[in-house]
Amino acid sequence: MTETVAVVGGTGTLGAPVVRHLLDRGASVFVLSRNATNVPAGAEHRRVDLASGEGLGAALAGATVVVDTANSNKGAEDVLVAGTRRLLEAGAAAGVGHHLAISIIGIDQVPMKYYRAKLAQEAAIESGPIPFSILRASQFHQLLDMALSAAARFGVRPTGAAKVQPIDPDVVAARLADAALAGPAGRLSEIAGPKVQTLSELSRTWAAARGKRRLPLPVPSWGKMGKAVAAGALCNPAATTAGKDFEEWLRHE
Ligand SMILES: NC(=O)c1ccc[n+]([C@@H]2O[C@H](COP(=O)([O-])OP(=O)(O)OC[C@H]3O[C@@H](n4cnc5c(N)ncnc54)[C@H](OP(=O)(O)O)[C@@H]3O)[C@@H](O)[C@H]2O)c1
């Protein structure tokens, strides 16, 4: 059967390659977001706003699978938690048979507001009305690139023992596309990048690749959050995949 997949946040860093991989696999694809930027030929854009629920009912008409790759840092409660509840309700009404969402490795060990919202999003899905799958991934290369670029604008290069295992979102997207078409499977095995590296190693790599010499700024691993991240809570060496490490990604992106 050809699945009709609604990719929520299908214009984003992760969502856009998910849409591409689904089209490559022969699925029919609706891209759900507020703005219709970055929608490839072959996919249909349907406007929704998770923060208000606007458009959800109409946008899900005909969808058999929902892949939720939406994101909001500032509006995490509204978009990821309340928005997920709205999405599940609208999905159930539309007869969606599989709700697949992306989450993050280690969110239960690192006390951060955004991660609390991601945990609440997972809980809403697990107790929701639609058979589900949840994939936890490590940080995307783009996130580190953005954070290090921002620090560089202030003239510094953050260093420290924090450990990250960054991944190319294209690799995550391929796994999500396969999972979307495979049917509901609950908690999927986690996915992480090819190398666990410290903030010092990653920022040195970034500075060399971008040709930006900056003053090293030590970021201490204080408190429960700092200690957990330095101990590798956001990484999972057993979930290591092939694909570009941060240095290779910087060279090709
Ligand atoms: N970034 C990482 O390192 C990382 C790592 C692991 C997991 N994740 C997870 O991956 C997911 C996607 O992250 P990302 O970095 O790809 O996000 P992103 O690039 O910021 O994309 C966010 C997407 O969500 C849409 N969106 C935002 N607000 C919305 C709203 N109110 N209603 C409907 N759509 C909305 C955006 O489109 P419009 O603005 O046009 O609406 C866009 O398509 C998140 O769940 C995140 O927790 C991220």
Image (tube, helix red, strand yellow):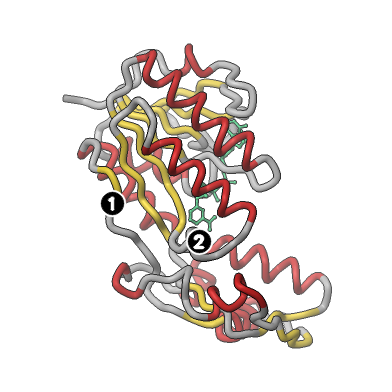
Mark 1 highlights which residue? 188
Measured as percent of width and height from the top left, residue 95 is found at 32, 16
* Residue found at x 62% / y 75%: 226
Amino acid residing under circle 1: Leu
Mark 2 highlights which residue? 140
* Residue found at x 22% / y 36%: 183
Per the image, label 1 sits on a secondary structure element best described as loop
Instruction: Name which quarter of the figure residue 35 lies in.
Output: top right
Q: From the viewer's perspective, is the residue at label 1 or at label 2 nearer?
A: 1
**Image: 108 above or below 246:** above
Measured as percent of width and height from the top left, residue 82 is found at 57, 31
**Image: 14 above or below 171:** above
Mark 1 / mark 2, whichever is N-terminal: 2
Near mark 2 (Cα within 10 A), the count class, few <14, some 14-19 or many ≥20, is many
Please report contact status of discs 1 and 2: CB closer than 8 Å, yes or no. Answer: no
Per the image, label 2 sits on a secondary structure element best described as loop
Amino acid residing under circle 2: Phe
Mark 1 → mark 2, Cα distance in angstroms: 18 Å
